[in-house]
Image (cartoon, helix red, strand yellow):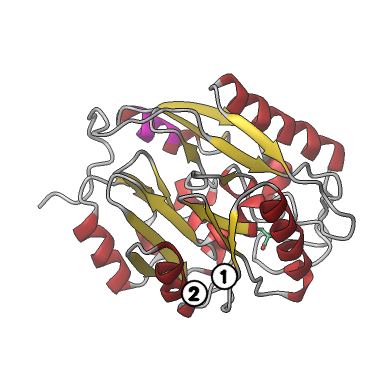
Amino acid sequence: MEKHRSSIAAAPATRSPGRRTYLMCRPAYYAVEYAINPWMDTTAPVDATLACAQWEALVDAYTLLGHEVVTIEPEPGLPDMVYSANGAFVVDGIAYGASFRYPERRPEADAHEKWYRTSGWTFAEPEFINEGEGDFTYLPGRELILAGWGFRTDARAHAEAADVFGRPVVSLRLVDPRYYHLDTALAPLDDERIAYYPEAFAPGSRLLLERLFPDAVIADAEDAAGFGLNFVSDGRSVVINAEATGFAKKLRDAGYETVPVDLSELKKGGGSVKCCTAELRQ
Ligand code: ARG
């Protein structure tokens, strides 16, 4: 079986570029004040004004693609709140709440809970540590939830999510601290197909991914380091960190359109396009 087909052009099997709804949080209080992942350097300067402008450009990219962006109010003292993907994981109109690993980010969970509850979503309170869509994603065409563990999310939260959603959850173990959330190493391209960086996963998880997704687009070390896997795809257009030029080319060769957005400032916190975007699935 041919496993690595990243360079072979093929039309995506499933495309559903319908209108998506994304929850985002303006980086009004963004800074690198603590270091909880290897990308964060508290001594390196961050241009807060540029971060806001880059974030605005991401909002504009989604809007131009026809998607809806809703926002949660940023809170002072929560510099990582811009990474709204971590606040919950939403499928079937149910928001499974986050419970953060590090104390610095814990209050974000309350802010998100309040937002989801007052915005009409069914809210499921978590018992176990999990960082929302940072470590969970959903493939509607396969009716599968993919979930990461190893650095942030407790593997017991995977069973909890299966229980909350009544859907199968595939557990994948992350082993490279630079790719501490699933969404830094793997992302859905459309309803059935994914892209991922194999080296970020434990051997058993790699085998599992090869078995489940023989048509995946495979990323290399450079693609991953440019946050190329931290993209948001609507099934046709892939919004991707501008630095990941090589990976964007692989995605175009695989039949997708790419929309580069420069998020250099937000990378200093260890996040990019996907981290700043929570998909709200009805
Ligand atoms: N500084 C944040 C943290 O380490 C970055 C979160 C990135 N978000 C994501 N969905 N990967 O928690």
The image quarter containing residue 246 is top left
Q: Range of the magenta residues? A: 248-252
Across and down, in percent, residue 249 comes to 40, 30
Q: Which amino acid, mark 1?
A: Asn
Residue 218 appears anywhere in the view: no
Choose top left, top right, bottom left or bottom right for residue 11: top left
Residue 23, above or below 12: below
Residue assigned mark 1: 130
The residue located at (36%, 47%) in the rendering is 195
150 relative to 66, above or below: below
Q: CA distance from mark 2 to mark 1?
A: 6 Å
**Quadrant containing ligand 1:** bottom right
Please report the residue visible at 30 percent of the width from the left and 44 percent of the height from the top.
193
Q: Residues within 10 Å of mark 1 (few under 14, many from 20)?
A: many
Mark linked to residue 121: none
Disc 1, SS: loop
Q: Is residue 168 above or below residue 23?
A: below
Callout 2 crowding tier (Cα within 10 Å): few <14, some 14–19, many ≥20: many
| Residue type marked 2 | Ala
